[in-house]
Image: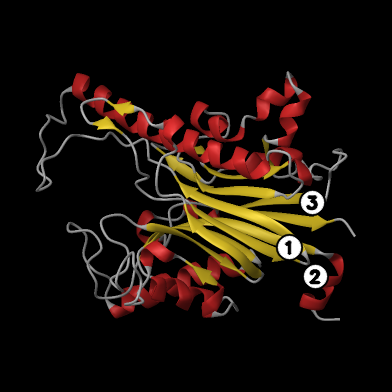
């Protein structure tokens, strides 16, 4: 029996998330202050990312920081997928795209999903939910995602599963600029820097709250599982990450299981065996897990509504120990093996 047939009979799959660090077509400017990749540089990056992701053997891959669908499709093909397995609307190189008119992502990179499974639904979360809109200091109401999350619903061995991938606002200070991009604030003033970081936190919080509202709509009084994964730009227990998951609320109200999300690494059947190497990014010299993978109650083995379980979670992060110039991506890859009940 080949591996695909074996996997199908076992009703199991691997799902992973990876930040691809400005993955763009060659010879195109993605940021004004960043040089375009030469053909050789692009091929090196494509080959390097392929080597890293090939080890994950993932059936579903959520990706962040994609500038061009052509580049992502080339990566998918190199991993054994087909171009039609790629969903990345905000980085489309198709001239008929209403979002990009074929120019790829503009101003900021996009998120995408590669899936071997049939796609039942695909949509973007572009607007911040009304109840999550807040005023950002010195800016005003934050009403649209900077990098809209992507929702793809797939059919995995006859089981519909909703996949949401996101790339939330970073911790990097958000300084005010004019329409031409010129700074309006003194970046060296420590008090201004604090206010600029507060803006970033408020943006990330609004995005997290809006995603949470979408998750509640998907999960409430349903038995269809959901997986949230991506670059959340903060650790698992942070206020903004838990704003999306609300895992802790289950301790006080068991009814919250219906809409809560659970850290796959904490509920895995083999919990603990990889805990000493669990990091996905090195921030200011400190390793941390800011790339997350959460699942709904249907993947809790002790739930009466269980449809499967997270058998194990793996972190692929050895490349983060290389010199920065040798890294094709600067985040680790997190992967979960999920087995559906027979």
Confirm whether residue 116 shows in the render: yes
Q: CA distance from mark 3 to mark 1?
A: 10 Å
Q: Which label was assigned to residue 13?
A: 1
Disc 1 secondary structure class:
strand
Q: CA distance from mark 2 to mark 1?
A: 7 Å
Disc 3 secondary structure class:
strand
Residue in the image at 57% along x and 49% along y: 229
Q: Is 62 left or right of 256, judged from the image as shown? A: left
Q: Which percent across, then down, holds residue 142?
A: 32, 35
Q: Which residue is label 2 attached to? A: 7
Q: Which label was assigned to residue 311?
A: 3
Residue in the image at 42% along x and 39% along y: 283
Instruction: Pick the residue in front: 96 or 260.
Output: 96
Q: Earlier in the sequence, mark 3 or mark 2?
A: 2
Q: Residues within 10 Å of mark 3 (few under 14, many from 20)?
A: many
Residue 233 occupies which quadrant of the picture?
A: top left
Q: Residues within 10 Å of mark 1 (few under 14, many from 20)?
A: many
Asked if disc 2 and disc 1 are in contact, CB closer than 8 Å, the reply is yes
């Amino acid at each position: 029996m080949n591996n695909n047939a074996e996997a199908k009979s076992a009703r199991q799959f691997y799902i992973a998330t990876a930040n691809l660090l400005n993955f763009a077509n060659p010879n195109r400017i993605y940021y004004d202050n960043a040089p375009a990749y030469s053909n050789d540089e692009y091929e090196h990056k494509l080959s390097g990312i392929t080597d890293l992701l090939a080890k994950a053997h993932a059936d579903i891959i959520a990706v962040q920081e994609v500038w061009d669908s052509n580049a992502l499709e080339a990566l998918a093909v190199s991993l054994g997928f087909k171009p039609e397995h790629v969903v990345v609307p905000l980085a489309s190189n198709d001239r008929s795209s209403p979002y990009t008119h074929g120019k790829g992502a503009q101003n900021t990179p996009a998120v995408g999903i590669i899936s071997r499974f049939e796609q039942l639904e695909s949509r973007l979360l572009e607007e911040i939910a009304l109840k999550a809109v807040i005023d950002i200091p010195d800016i005003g109401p934050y009403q649209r995602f900077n990098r809209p999350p992507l929702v793809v619903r797939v059919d995995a061995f006859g089981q519909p599963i909703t996949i949401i991938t996101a790339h939330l606002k970073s911790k990097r200070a958000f300084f005010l600029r004019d329409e031409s991009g010129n700074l309006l604030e003194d970046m060296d003033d420590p008090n201004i820097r604090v206010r600029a970081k507060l803006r970033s936190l408020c943006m990330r919080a609004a995005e997290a709250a809006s995603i949470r509202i979408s998750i509640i709509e998907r999960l409430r009084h349903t038995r269809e599982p959901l997986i949230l994964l991506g670059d959340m730009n903060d650790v698992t227990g942070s206020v903004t990450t838990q704003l999306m998951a609300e895992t802790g609320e289950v301790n006080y109200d068991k009814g919250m299981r219906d809409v809560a999300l659970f850290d796959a690494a904490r509920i895995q059947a083999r919990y603990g065996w990889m805990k000493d190497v669990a990091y996905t990014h090195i921030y200011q010299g400190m390793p941390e897990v800011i790339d997350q993978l959460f699942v709904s109650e249907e993947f809790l083995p002790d739930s009466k509504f269980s449809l499967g379980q997270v058998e194990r979670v793996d972190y692929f992060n050895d490349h983060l120990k290389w010199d920065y110039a040798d890294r094709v991506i600067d985040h680790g890859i997190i992967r979960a093996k999920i087995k559906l009940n027979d």
